[in-house]
Image (tube, helix red, strand yellow):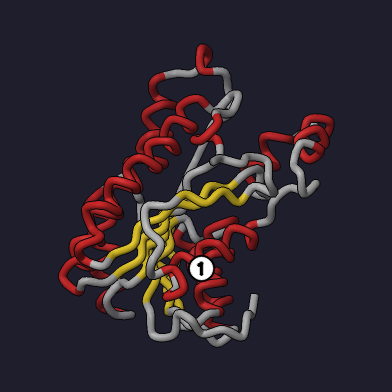
Amino acid sequence: MATGISRLQGKVALVTGAAQGIGRAIAARLASEGAAVAIADIQVEAAERTAQELRAGGAKAIAVKLDVTKLEDATQAADRVEQELGPIDILVNNAGWDKLEPFVNSAPETWDRIIAINYRGVLNCCRAIAPRMQTRSSGKIVSISSDAGRVGSTGEAVYAGCKAAIVGFSKTLARELARNKINVNVVCPGPTETALLREAMAGRQGVLDAMTRGIPLRRIGQPEDLAGAVAFLASPDADYVTGQVISVSGGLTMAG
């Protein structure tokens, strides 16, 4: 989406899980505001398609293979981005995965995968990239949590726990990195039109309708709704904002 604003001109952004969905919308928005963007995803072919689309629109973008569950992958991805685009100014931790089921029916193998992608993935990427930002005394880190981590969500116990952990981790990291002029913030989506939501709601239109009625703005979120919040936090407009959590949920959750 073109904004006519170039708040991020000259900046380099790495967005995880950016081949599709919310991550793709975030990458497109950052590119539209002038950033060079690394589409980091384990789905390499899809990531390359997204990068090609951004380049076709005049943006500078590359696709980077990244399995966020592995620290060495995060380090190698960061090395490649810095070689091809330059020092990373913006890290967006977006990659995520979930399996909807009651906790008492879930298996440890599922817990391990959810934790590895949703929480350890954030740790790995921050560990690989934050020290590079420290050397330059500059950087923006934005992690995508979820309102499930703030209020809970039926069928998402382990996922909600990971998303709550991201909030606590990010607030602590914000304190530790403030002396290096690095801002760390969190965006919490509410129900958003993604492949995961479509899969979860398949054959359950009544549930989806009830969910929509519970949102004060009376609609399910779109990936672009999240992208705007991330772009703000990644921009100079948010230079004095750190350790904060912003819900983008149409008013479904209103935390004090």
Task: Please state the horizontal and vertical placement of residue 174, each as a whole percent of the image.
Answer: 30, 54
Question: Residue at image x 61%, y 85%?
Answer: 4
Q: Is residue 98 left or right of residue 72?
A: right
State the quadrant of the C terminus: top right
- The residue tagged 1 is 232
Q: Position of residue 161 (x, y in %)?
A: 43, 30
- Along the horizontal axis of the image, is 59 left or right of 70? right
Picture residue at 31% right of the left edge, 69% below the top? 139
Position above or below: 183 against 149? below
Q: Residue at x 41, y 62 (%)?
A: 241
Relative depth, front residue between 111 and 160? 160
Can residue 203 be spotted in the picture? no
Vertical side of 146 occupied by 11: above or below: below
Where residue 37 appears, as percent x and y from the top left, is 43, 74
Q: How far across and down, in percent of the image, does residue 111 sit?
A: 41, 26
- Residue 177 visible, this angle: yes
Q: Residue at x 52, y 42 (%)?
A: 146
